[in-house]
Image (spheres, rainbow, N blue to C red):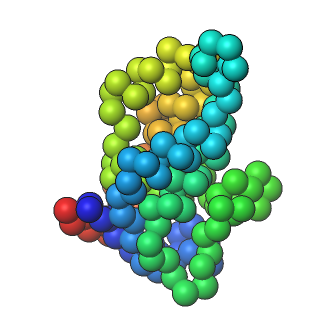
Amino acid sequence: MKQETLEIDNRFGEEYPGKYTFAEITWAKRNRIIQKHTKYNKLSGDVESSDFIAIQAETIMASMHVQPQSHPITLEKLLGEEDGVPIELGELFSKVVNKLNGMSREDLRFLLEQLDEENRIALLSSLGYVKPSAGHPQSLPSSQQEQCRSSATS
């Protein structure tokens, strides 16, 4: 299974520095997470709604195999609206996890066809394809990328 390790410095806050290792999750695990946070029409089976933030947060936690001993990342912290992780850190984790557990174009196309515009934007934002509405950068500036070393192994 593919793995990727990030070495995070303290630019996201004093509680986050350290090594984080993510590993690919199984198809079954990914689908169980999606099913858990997706509501379907009982008659037609069409998708009525999906909580993309919860899906992404649970996928991050399922993929995270190593984090600093202080365990600064929890599901509650990822989902927290007031005391959550910094946006840039969450986006970095999402990018790594999405790369490891790659959603196929067909999966993405299917999900996008089921959604209204607001939910489509939320999904694409959670996957790192569009900027969040607050206007925060989607990717780290090159100086920050150098500070955050990433190593990937297959």
- Give coordinates of residue 142: x percent, y percent: 34, 55
Q: Is residue 38 left or right of residue 108?
A: right
The picture quadrant where one finds residue 150 is bottom left
Check the picture and name the quadrant holding the C terminus.
Answer: bottom left
What residue is drawn where x is 56% and y is 47%?
33
- Give coordinates of residue 59: x percent, y percent: 51, 53
Can residue 137 be seen? no
In front of the other: 95 or 39: 39
In front of the other: 23 or 17: 23
What residue is drawn where x is 44% and y is 72%?
65
- Give coordinates of residue 3: x percent, y percent: 30, 65
- Give coordinates of residue 123: x percent, y percent: 55, 32
Q: Is residue 102 left or right of residue 137?
A: left
In the current view of this chain or complex, which residue is farthest to the front? 43
The picture quadrant where one finds residue 148 is bottom left
Count of numbered badges drawn on the protein = 0
In the current view of this chain or complex, which residue is farthest to the right? 82
Q: Is residue 142 left or right of residue 78?
A: left
In the current view of this chain or complex, which residue is farthest to the left? 154
Q: Is residue 36 left or right of residue 18?
A: right
In front of the other: 46 or 123: 46
Check the picture and name the quadrant holding the N terminus.
Answer: bottom left
In front of the other: 79 or 138: 79
The picture quadrant where one finds residue 69 is bottom right
The relative height of residue 144 versus residue 16 in the rendered view (above or below) is above
The relative height of residue 65 versus residue 118 in the rendered view (above or below) is below
What residue is drawn where x is 45% and y is 76%?
66
The relative height of residue 36 versus residue 44 in the rendered view (above or below) is below
Can residue 73 be seen? yes
